[in-house]
Amino acid sequence: MSAASNHGATPYYFVPAPSRHPAMVAFGLFLVILGAGQWVNGHGWGAWSLLAGLAVWLGTLYFWFGEAIAESEGGQYSDRIDISFRWSMSWFIFSEVMFFAAFFGALYWARVHSVPELGSLENQLLWPDFKGMWPSTVAGATASPAGTVEPFTTMGPWPIPTINTAILLTSGVTLTIAHHALIANQRAKTIFWMWITVLLGIVFLGFQAYEYMHAYSELNLKLTSGIYGSTFFMLTGFHGFHVFVGMLMLLFITLRLTKGHFTPTRHFGFEGAAWYWHFVDVVWLGLYVVVYWL
C-alpha cells in the first residue's frame, strides 16, 4: 500500500528545504515572454528564446512536481498541509474567476456602452452609415465604424458550441463518477472513468480547433475583426487554454492512479484537479450563453 495512507499522522508542518525551482520557473517564463514579444515583432531569434523558455519551464516543473509527489507519497504531509493545499487551490480558482470576470466585463462594456456610443447622434456626422449594434444582433454589422473591419459572419451556437457544451457537461458527470469510485476504493473503475474524462477534454479541444479554422476560412471571423472578433477569441481562447490545462491535470492524476497513488480518504490532488475542471465547466456555460446566443 502507498505510504500516502499514513497522511495526517505527521505531527509537524512539513517545510521543504530551500529550492532553486521557483527561480528556474521565473527564468523560464522570462524567456517565454521575451521570445514571444520579439517573435511577433519580426525578430527570428524570439522563436528560439520562446522554445528555450518553454524547455526550462516544463523541465523545472517536471522535477518540482516529482519532488512534491515523493514528499506526499512518503507520508510527510499532515492534515495541516492538506488544509493549506485546499486554501491555496481555492484562492487560485478565485483568481481565475477574476480573470474571466474582467473578460466578461469587457464584453459587457463593449456591447452596452462603447458600440452604442459610437452609433449615437453625436457621431452620425463622422460615420453616417455606422450601425451601433452588436454584430450578433444585426446582420452585416461589424461594430466598427468607417469600414475599418472587413465584413464577417458571427459564430452561432449550432452545431459545434452546443456539442462542446454537451461534451463538457458529460465530462463533469464522468469525473464525479470517478471520484465516487475512488472514495469507494474501486481503483479500476476510477481509472476507467478518468480516462473517459480526459478523452472528452481532448475531443472538446479538437472541436474548438475546428471551430477556429471554420471561423477564419469560411466566416472571415478573425482576431482582427474589431471588438467582436477580439472578445470572441479572447473569451473562447482563454477558456480553451484552461480546458487544456485542466485536461493535463486530469491526465497526470490518472497516471498517478495507475501507480497506486491516492487513497479513499487522502486524495486532494484528485480533488484539486476536479475543482478546477468543474470551474471550467461552469465558465463555459456562461460563455456559451453570452458569446454564442446573445
Image (cartoon, grey):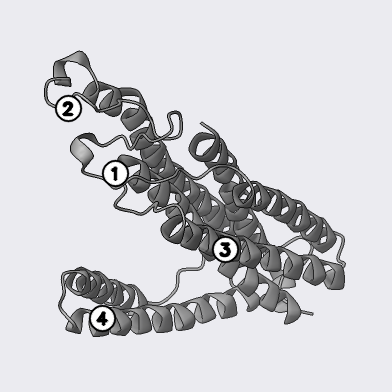
Assign a secondary structure to mark 4: helix
Choose mark 3 or mark 1, whichever is in front. 1
Q: Which x, y percent locates residue 104?
A: 41, 37
Can you identify the residue that label 3 sits on?
205
Q: Which x, y percent locates residue 227?
A: 31, 41
In space, the residues marked 2 and 1 are separated at their CA atoms by: 16 Å
Choose mark 2 or mark 1, whichever is in front. 2
Q: Amino acid at mark 1?
A: Gly
In space, the residues marked 4 and 1 are separated at their CA atoms by: 27 Å
Q: Which x, y percent locates residue 103?
A: 38, 41
Front residue of 36/277: it is: 36
Can you identify the residue that label 2 sits on?
127
Picture quadrant of residue 210: bottom right
Can you identify the residue that label 4 sits on?
47
Assign a secondary structure to mark 3: helix
For the residues labelled 4 and 2, say whether their Cβ atoms are less than 8 Å apart.
no
Front residue of 59/41: it is: 41
* For marks 2 and 3 on the same chain, the one whose residue lies earlier in the sequence: 2
Q: Amino acid at mark 2?
A: Trp
Front residue of 113/8: it is: 113
Q: Which x, y percent locates residue 146?
A: 18, 36
For the residues labelled 3 and 1, say whether their Cβ atoms are less than 8 Å apart.
no
Q: Amino acid at mark 3?
A: Leu
Residue furthest to the left:
126
Q: Amino acid at mark 4?
A: Ala
Q: Residue at x 51, y 80 (%)?
A: 67
User: Is 39 on the left-hand or right-hand side of 170?
Assistant: left
In space, the residues marked 4 and 2 are separated at their CA atoms by: 41 Å
User: Is 191 on the left-hand or right-hand side of 222?
Assistant: right
In space, the residues marked 4 and 3 are separated at their CA atoms by: 24 Å
Can you identify the residue that label 1 sits on?
226
Q: How many marks?
A: 4
